Image: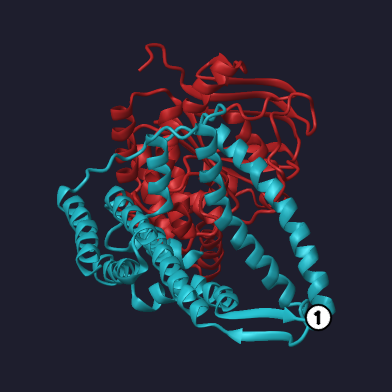
Chain colours: A cyan, B red
């Protein structure tokens, strides 16, 4: 979580959130509607190139984030590759099916390229920019405030929880499985109280800054780079073009 | 500025505060020390340090300065006028008296520094271009312009502390109250903080800090207020107040080092019977003043 967030905030494309959102959403759409070969494959290739050379995400980070959904996909598509049948005469039968293999390939390719387009988005656009954009397209204020506070608190709780675990483990709270269960449950309980306390303290802290029920802040308006935008449109059309030529 | 400015920007008259009273405006989570009969006066444009041991009531007192706490009895005067605890008046009050809490995470809520600092000015109902100017200026004043676009959770403790200060400075308060501003900062962080405070003071702000760092208070403050068990023990000029060793010790404090050193020197000079020349400092007070000037940080 921290890793993704950090790179979203320091990558080369962080100043072009709107263009990147357009680019990756377009790629996502292409990955879903075009035939996987070559459409989805092209999307996957484009995303990889964009992430590594455009946004300058280190390959290690990019592939690590990509690996997570990939493992799910591979495990999930095992069911497609093997067909299981049960017959009175032959009994339980597990067979490798060629057709299933074909389906699995299609599914994996299509999903991983669609997911990669989303990963490009999460790795290159800071959540704060997405929130700003949501405000601009008039998502209800209450929802945005909720997202923003959750985003802030996630990291605070992560820190509190880490320090609770550390405090317990330096006193051997995780020596064996039984103790680990006990320590973990009490840590979660303490975290709950800390969370309540935090919320109360933040409320009075905000009150002393003039808070009166609405978290109003000034959003920075970004200029859209037309060159980046044209680049995104071109990328979409090139993928479309190649797909139609090769079919 | 207002035509008939009062010499004292804040004045407390026999302030009493009991925890759990109906008038409490939401506690800070930690049970605060009650106040019993606090009276003090804070001069406009002065630098005041409130000193006291843990649980002496420093934080509880400062929460009264911007109207967060309403006293159980007694009176608080802001610029010579009795405090008004109506919702509208309190908003105005909180703008005039800015409060920086000890833990910056109690004050910072927004995802980026710029957005967070804009919160206060937005609450004042200023137009957006004005807000932008104020935020930019506040960030410059606190030397954190380069952090503007950073997500708040990626900042170090010292940086978060500065963001919290910038968030209050952007509201352009007349009085800035900082609760334990140096707690958790490294020496260079403390220096930077003192530079920021000096800049704000030069612009005419009245500064109030709470601390238990006697050396810092001695070198920095125009006036010190010593607290103990929810009461003000002494208020006055640092040299005079802090030389009272029994009083300082009873308030869980100790003497600042320049004072202690001055005393040690005096004793030793006397026992060595060194004759003072005419141009040398000829009294303990002068000597301490000389050390004090040296111990102050360059600004």
In this rendering, is residue A9 above or below B194? below
Q: Residue at 64% of width from left, 60% of height from top? A: A160
Q: Nearer the viewer, residue A103 or B227?
A: A103
In this rendering, is residue B182 above or below B275? above
Q: Quadrant of residue A187?
A: bottom right
Disc 1 designates what residue?
A: A177
Instruction: Check the residue under mark 1 and report the chain it is in.
Output: A
Side of A76 where B174 appears, left or right:
left
Circle 1 sits in a helix, a strand or a loop, which is it?
A: helix
Side of B4 where A228 appears, left or right:
left
Question: In the current view of this chain or complex, which residue is farthest to the left?
Answer: A227
Q: Residue at 28% of width from left, 34% of height from top? A: B133
Q: Nearer the viewer, residue A56 or A205?
A: A56
Side of A33 where A139 appears, left or right:
right
Q: Residues within 10 Å of mark 1 (few under 14, many from 20)?
A: few
* Residue B266 visible in the snapshot: yes
Q: Nearer the viewer, residue A203 or A208?
A: A203
List x then y, in percent, for residue A236.
Answer: 24, 57
Question: In the current view of this chain or complex, which residue is farthest to the bottom?
Answer: A90
Side of B256 where B222 appears, left or right:
left
List x then y, in percent, for residue A4.
Answer: 44, 65
Q: Residue at 50% of width from left, 70% of height from top? A: A69
Q: Quadrant of the C terminus of chain A?
A: bottom left
């Amino acid at each position: 979580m921290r890793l993704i967030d950090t790179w979203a905030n320091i990558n080369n494309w962080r100043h072009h959130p709107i263009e990147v959102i357009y680019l990756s959403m377009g790629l996502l759409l292409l990955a879903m509607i075009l035939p996987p070969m070559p459409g989805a494959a092209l999307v996957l290739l484009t995303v990889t190139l964009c992430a590594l050379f455009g946004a300058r995400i280190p390959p290690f980070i990019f592939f690590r984030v990509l690996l997570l959904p990939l493992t799910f996909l591979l495990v999930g598509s095992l069911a497609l590759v093997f067909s299981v049948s049960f017959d009175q005469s032959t009994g339980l039968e597990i067979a490798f099916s060629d057709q299933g293999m074909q389906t699995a390939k299609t599914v994996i390719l299509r999903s991983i390229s669609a997911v990669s387009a989303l990963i490009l988005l999460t790795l290159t656009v800071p959540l704060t920019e997405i929130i700003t954009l949501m405000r601009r397209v008039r998502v209800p204020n209450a929802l945005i405030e909720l997202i923003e506070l959750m985003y802030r608190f996630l990291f605070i709780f992560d820190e509190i929880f880490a320090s609770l675990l550390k405090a317990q483990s330096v006193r051997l709270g995780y020596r064996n499985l039984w103790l680990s269960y006990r320590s973990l449950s009490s840590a979660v309980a303490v975290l709950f109280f800390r969370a309540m306390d935090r919320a109360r303290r933040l409320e009075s802290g905000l009150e002393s800054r003039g808070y009166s029920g609405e978290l109003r802040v000034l959003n920075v308006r970004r200029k859209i780079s037309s060159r980046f935008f044209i680049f995104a449109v071109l990328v979409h059309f090139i993928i479309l073009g190649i797909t139609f030529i090769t079919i | 500025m207002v035509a008939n400015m009062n010499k004292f920007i804040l004045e407390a008259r026999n302030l009493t505060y009991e925890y759990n009273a109906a008038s409490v405006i939401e506690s800070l989570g930690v049970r605060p020390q009650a106040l019993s009969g606090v009276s003090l006066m804070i001069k406009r444009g002065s630098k005041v340090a409130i000193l006291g041991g843990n649980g002496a009531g420093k934080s509880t007192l400062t929460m009264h300065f911007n109207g967060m706490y309403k006293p159980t009895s007694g009176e608080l005067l802001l610029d010579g006028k009795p405090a008004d605890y109506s919702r509208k008046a309190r908003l105005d009050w909180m703008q005039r008296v800015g409060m920086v809490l000890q833990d910056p995470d109690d004050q910072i809520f927004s995802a980026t520094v710029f957005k967070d600092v804009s919160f206060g000015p937005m609450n004042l109902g200023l137009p957006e271009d004005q807000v932008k100017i104020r935020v930019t200026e506040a960030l410059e004043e606190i030397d954190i312009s380069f952090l503007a676009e950073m997500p708040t959770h990626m900042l170090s403790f010292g940086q978060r502390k500065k963001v919290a200060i910038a968030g209050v400075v952007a509201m352009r308060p007349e009085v800035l109250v900082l609760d334990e501003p140096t707690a958790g900062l490294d020496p260079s962080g403390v220096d930077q903080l003192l530079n920021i405070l000096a800049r704000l003071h030069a612009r005419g702000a009245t500064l109030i800090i709470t601390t238990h760092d006697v050396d810092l208070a001695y070198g920095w403050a125009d006036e010190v207020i010593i607290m103990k068990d929810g009461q003000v023990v002494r208020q006055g000029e640092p040299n005079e107040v802090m030389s009272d060793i029994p009083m300082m010790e009873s308030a869980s404090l100790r003497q600042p080092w320049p004072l202690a050193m001055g005393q040690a020197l005096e004793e030793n000079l006397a026992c060595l019977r060194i004759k003072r020349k005419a141009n040398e400092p000829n009294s303990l007070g002068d000597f301490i003043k000389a050390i004090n000037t040296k111990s102050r940080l360059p600004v």
